[in-house]
Each structure stands twice: as C-alpha cells, then as structure tokens.
Image: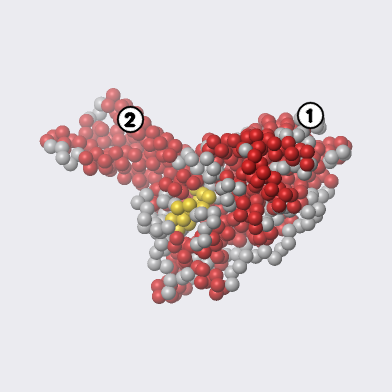
Amino acid sequence: MNFFERQAQARRNTTRLVVLFALAVISIVVLVNLGVVFLLGPQVDVLIGASVITLAVIGLGSLYRIASLGAGGERVATQLGGVAVPEDTTDPQLRRLRNVVEEMAIASGVPMPALFVLEHEAGINAFAAGYSPSDAAVAVTRGALERLNRDELQGVVAHEFSHVLNGDMRLNIRLMGILFGILMIGLIGRRIMLHAGAARGRDGAFVLLLAAAFAAIGYAGVFFGRMIKAGVSRSREVLADASAVQFTRQTQGLAGALKKIAGVSAGSQLQERADAEEISHMLFGDGVGLRGLFATHPPVLARIQALEPGFTDAQLSALSKRWLQAPPSGLEEDLQLGLVDRSDVPLPAHRAEIAVTPDRVAAHVATPEDGDWVCASRIVQDIPEPLRQAARRRDAVMPLLLGLLLDADADIRGHQLDEIATRLGPTLAEATRQLREEGLAQLHPMHRLPLAQLAFPVLRLRPRPELGAFVDAVHAVTHTDGTLSLFEYCLGQLLQVQVMESLDPARHARFGRQRAGNVKQEFATLLAVVAQAGHVGDAEGARRAYLAGMHRVLPRDHVPYTPPAAGVQALDTVWDPLDRLDPLAKQVLVEAITDAILHDGRISVAESELLRTICGVLHCPLPPALEQRPAA
C-alpha cells in the first residue's frame, strides 16, 4: 500500500475501533445489569438507571482521558515519563539519536519530531505519539541508546516514523482514551474496596459486595481492552517493520534490534511504568509480557524471521549466552563496524532538471527509501553550520524562519523587515536581516524546506503569545507585495499550518472524507496558480498546463482556465477544503499538480521544492530525492 491507501486503511481502522468499543460498552452494561439483578432483583427503573450511569461513567472517563492527551505528542511523552532531549546535548548517545532522527525527518519530508528519552528504562523500546507529524514526539529508552548500534537505532526510529506517516499515532491516542473509559468501572470498584474496609454491619458487607461486583466487571473491561488493542495493533506492527526495511533499504538494523530485545536480559520490558499496559500498543516491542490473544505484537522470533528467514531459535540462544557474559554496547559497535553517515551523493545543481512522472511522485509521498536517506544525510551536512545551530536555538529560530521568506528584491525585503520590526521588534528584524545576508540568500533550494523542518519543534517551544505574534508576522511578510513567489507564499502557509496545529493538535487531526467532485473550484484555483507560476509570460502554455492537471483530477468536467485576479493569494481559500479530501482523492490531486508542473516536459529543482511545499501544506509529506526513485 502507498501512503494514501494506508491513510484510507487508518480511517477504516478508526471505524473498526468505534465498533469494537461499542460492543465492549454494550457487554459491560449487560454485566452491570446482571449484577444489579443479582443484588436487587429485576427492577426496571433500577436497571435503566444502572445502564445510564454505566454509560455516563464510561463516556466521561473516555472523554477525560482523550482531553488529557489533547495537547499532542509532547504532552503524551511527558505523561509517560519522557525527558526532553536538549537541542544542544553533549551526551554522545543523545547526539547520535538526534542526528538519526534529523536525517529521518528530512528523508521522509516531515517536521523534526520532539525527542524524549525514558532515562530509567533498561529495556530496549521506543514509541511515537501525537495526532499528526506536526506535533509528533518520538521517545526511546536509555536501554535502546546503550545497547543498539547506529544501524539498529535507525531501524527502530524508521519503525516509529512509519507510525507517524501512516496515521497510527492518532489512532493510538484515541485507543488510550476509549480504553480508559472501559476500565473505569473496575477502577471505581477497586477504589470502593480500598475505602470500605472500615465499614461495619450489613451496610458495610453490601458495599463490599457491590465493590467486588464492580471489580469483577472491571476485569471484563480489561479483557475487552486487551482484545481491542491486540486486534488493532498486531497488523500495524507488521506493516511498520516492513516500512522500516523499505526506508533504510537493509534488514540488518531492524533485525539486530529485535535480536537484542530477545537476547539481552532486560528485553523490551518497561519496569518503571506502572501504567505500561496502557501504552503497550504504542511500543516498538512488547513492554508488559502479554501473550496469545492479548499480545499487541507478533512474537519477536517471528518478526526476526520475517526479516531473515533462515534465522533459528538456536542462533538466538547462542546470542543470548554471549550477551549474558558481555552485554552489547551500541557506541562501541559503531566504532568496531565503522558505521558512519552515508553522504557521498551530491545534490542536483540549482538549475538541474529532474525526470519524474505523476504516478512516481504520488507513490513517493510518505514512502521514503534508501536514496532519500542518502540525500537527507547530504542535506544535513551541507546546510551551513551557523544555520543548523540557529534552527536549534530558541532565540534564533524565529528570525531564521522569517529569513527564508524574505524576497530577493531589496525594496520588497525592506518592507518585509519593517513589518517584522513592527510586530516582533527591531532586534529580531535585524537578526533576520543578518541571517539572510550570512547564508540564507545563498541557500540551495533543496535546503530551505529541510531547514524549516528542523526548526519547527524548536519554534513550538516558544510561549503561546509569541507564537501568535509570529504567525501574524509571517502573514504580513508573505502578503507584503502581490508579486510574492508561489514558493514563498506556500512556505509561509506551511509555517502557519505547523504552528497552528501545534497549538491545538487534537482539533486539527482528521481523516478527510471530502470527494473530488465537491471541490472543483478549489482544484481549479490551485492548478491555475501552479500553471501560471510555471509559465510566466506564456498564457497559452499556462492554459495547457492547467488543462493537463484538470484532466487528471476531473476528466469528465470542464472548468475553464481563469487565472485568479488575486494571484497567489487566491490560494488562501483552497487549503482547508483540499486538506479535507479523502486520502485517495488527495493522491489524484498530487498527480494533477505534478502533471501541471511537468506539462513542459521538465521539472526544475525549484519546482520540485515547490511541489514538496504544497504537499506539506496538504499533509502529504514528500521526500527530497525525487530523482532517486526508479520509474514505475
């Protein structure tokens, strides 16, 4: 399956989750009513009241838990004991993790996620949390950092990135929320039993009996919860393993991590988290030891054999004996194996043309491969060090991102700096000007979007009032002059999307259901602007490019080519409707945009970056190395 098919599957999984939840709730209500009949007899009004109260308890419990997780991935990681990894960390294990995740983010075309470490967990494990890539957080255990070499860490991180890209994260959060509601009856029963021990006489005995009944029903909730998690999680873990191998183009890393989970004494168990079972479906490896029908992951040996079919249980036993005597050290293995960054492939020249097809581009969305990893490694190394450092500093991230939006024309740029000074102060405006002159103006087109992706998580650390002022400044800068380029406008829009989503991620998370036929005018406006931008001064060429794109997305409809009078600013009205498209309709839209750009038979580096930016605004992350993908 490609990205769009996986998104559609995730939406179906959400529907399936709702159905399973409804069945579990009905079963719990029936059990409660049976308990009421046993204790009080068959009284209709009492049974109705018990049903209503049970539904209210479950519903309010789920809503409470979902609301507590509504702030996004960073809040989830913090609640689960994660400690944020500093941007300027000197810990060699954390620096290696940050470098791996930075390259992975650039290679997959998503913003750099927030990084966390579970410091007191010796087991090898990891998880990704959040509602969308813009608010994602990735957490790994200290045991994973200590025991895994770089290739193995890449495999684990790639596995977690597949959950980020496939829409699994928001399903995981919703799963945590609804399961909490199912467990509420049992939690109430256990609380009553703890506080009812001092009660005396018949009343005390009745209260204890009632509490025991609630606790028993609670175990039914545990049963249904485990069954739901197992049913939803196992198949997604298999897909994530396959995606990780596709991403890194080698099986040794992921297989090596799984072998160490099976072979070292700590395994993947979480020892410090009393609520480990609540997050068991989110973890890279089994964190609580559930087996059989309740297992949220396939057996470790089966996962290894899916990657290395000839691997046997005897080989695993031999590794276990060796590691029992000398536990593995990831950093030492890196030195012994000579694992270094792969960055020997140069980027295309500024004016190079890239051979792609619409089908190939759509297949590439959120489906990075080894060429993207190599390209990402090169991009990270080629971005000037002062700009990379600015992307990691809280005081420099705003001027850095604003500097990417400054126009090449000196007069327009002067007005933009005035807008920045008015909204954010002259000091920040001067810092923006300096960054522009000291490196941003000469930045390779393929460096601009990755640099912004590295800066997004640092930007989200700024206080909320400052983020609001920053969004206003971005809007002012991108609307200073009507001649603003399409790339500058889209990058400004992407910045606003990422910031607004991070402020309220739960509200922005959605699986689109809009059909293509309902957004004809939005299609027409976007394709007209793209065609116009690629054929400046050539009205007939722009019209043909527009028609090529429209034929791809709406072959039976005729929507005449009408260049928007507002130019690029006409796109302000199209983003939200297009972002609400059904996943498979989005796939056709990406193909249509590519058709419009490719109508003249070529796509430049600048046009490919424009395509990536539009895809980013529409939540279809496109990796950087378009030319690396073999023709379909």
**Picture coordinates of residue 306, whole percent (x, y):** 53, 63
Left or right: residue 510 versus residue 599 is left
Camera-nearest residue between 100 and 54: 100
Circle 1/circle 2 CB separation < 8 Å: no
Q: Where is residue 366 in the image (x, y as percent from the top left)?
A: 63, 50
**Circle 2 Cα neighbour tier, 10 Å, few/some/many (<14 / 14–19 / ≥20):** few
Q: Is residue 377 visible?
A: yes
* Colour style of the rendered protein structure: secondary structure
Mark earlier in primary sequence (1, 2)? 2
Residue 345 shown left or right of residue 323 in the figure? right
Q: In which quarter of the image is the C terminus?
A: bottom right
* Residue at position x 70%, y 55% in the image: 625
Distance (Cα) linking label 1 and label 2: 58 Å
Residue 246 location (% of width, % of height): 61, 59
SS for callout 2: helix
> Disc 1 vs disc 2: which is toward the camera?
1
Three-letter residue code for mark 2: Ile
**Vertically, is 447 above or below 581?**
below
Q: Residue at x 49, y 46 (%)?
A: 74
Residue at 72% over, 42% down: 406
> Which residue corresponds to mark 2?
53
Q: Mark 1 points at which residue?
A: 565
- Secondary element at tag 1: loop
Q: Which mark is residue 118?
A: none
- State the residue at coordinates (65%, 51%): 451
Q: What residue type is labelled 1?
A: Ala
Considering depth in this image, is 263 or 331 the residue closer to the camera?
Answer: 331
